[in-house]
Amino acid sequence: MSDTVVSTRPEVSPTVGEEQAVVDRLSRLNRFLPVWIAAAMAVGLGLGRLFPGLNGALNRVAIHGTSLPIAVGLLLMMYPVLAKVRYGEVGRIAADRRMIAASLALNWVVGPAVMFALAWALLPDQPAYRTGVILVGLARCIAMVLIWTDLADGDREMAAVLVALNAVFQVLAYAALGVFYLNVLPRWLGLRTESLSVSMGTIAATVAIFLGIPLVAGFVTRTLGERRRGRAWYEERFLPKIGPVALYGLLFTVVILFALQGRKITSEPLDVARIALPLLAYFGIMWSGGFAIGRRLHLSYPRTAALAFSAASNDFELAIAVAIGVFGVTSGQALAGVVGPLIEVPVLLGLVYVALWIRRHFYLAKRKETR
């Protein structure tokens, strides 16, 4: 959804007009994305306040604990990005062991530990909110990271590999890590403990729905499209047509999320602000750490961006589903889960622009100097 989404060129790395500001080369639709996001938030809040029964209506039909409208928005948001992935290059990209090792460490060792520390430091007197925030930190991203990486002109193929790895570890480790960070580690540290009961099957089903369906659809679309019409047609004609659908899916999802919790968000602003504090710190720490490690490993800008956004993004649909399933839809844990993406969307969008600025002033400038 950067210029690669709406332009007619299949960009891998910038080679033309590098001295021109990246934002100036974005389409009008993408250039004003912060405005559209803000408008979507406002519309969602307005709907939630105007129609008190909207929450129940939207949740009446759910897909594995997630409201059907949210599920539809997520699938629409994911499909165009995954249709852009060059799956034939995934094997070569996955051979970068340094990148894979760094991502696994950031996502499954550093990330949960950072969120645990922030939750206890900033929410010591709010056990329900604290637990919800920790659940968000444990749920590694399998969806939105593809959007942020694409917006930042990152490596889509690498992002797809990292998402696949996170999906596997999500199924295998989420429940165990939940028990560890909510029960075992607090007991060792003499802190209050919380119980968590969630099955591996629940997590596997969530991953299969929100990653598996668009992944298969994207793979089939690219395979058949290239086989019948060729890569040039597929990337220069077809992808620009479906690219904006990802943005529409993102905006639709934001509207529904804010509508579902509109009354609670507007009636309890101080609680929302408190929940936001550890989340804001977390996104900044993890993204900066990922970018710093990428620079340390001398990774290219596209791969560094993929690493940073993978580290900073979270699987909010899983965190919300677990919080609702274990603690209830009106619980503080569920509210914390919902606040997660409400904070993540504008913050990660802002970091997209930071990443584009870094690329222009450090990566492109350095290449220009060495010519």
Image (cartoon, rainbow, N blue to C red):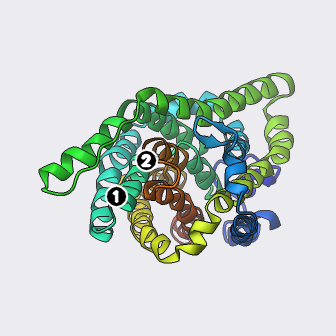
360 relative to 90, above or below = below
* Residue at x 52% of width, y 76% of height: 269
Residue 197 occupies which quadrant of the picture? top left
Inspect the image, locate mark 1, and give the three-letter code of the amino acid beneath it. Met
Farthest residue to the front: give it.
Answer: 53
Q: Position of residue 41 (x, y in %)?
A: 68, 67
* Residue at x 65% of width, y 57% of height: 260
Question: Which residue has dot 2 on it?
Answer: 327
Residue sitting nearer the eye, 193 or 170? 193
Question: Which residue has dot 1 on it?
Answer: 115
Q: CA distance from mark 2 to mark 1?
A: 20 Å
Quadrant location, the N terminus: bottom right
State the SS at label 1. helix
Inspect the image, locate mark 2, and give the three-letter code of the amino acid beneath it. Phe
Q: Position of residue 51 (x, y in %)?
A: 75, 63
Residue sitting nearer the eye, 251 or 365? 251
Q: Counting other residues with Cα less than 10 Å from the Cα at mark 1, is it few (<14), some (14-19), or many (20 or more)?
A: many
Q: Is residue 162 left or right of residue 240?
A: left
Q: Is residue 252 left or right of residue 228?
A: left
In the image, which is nearer the foreground, mark 2 or mark 1? 2
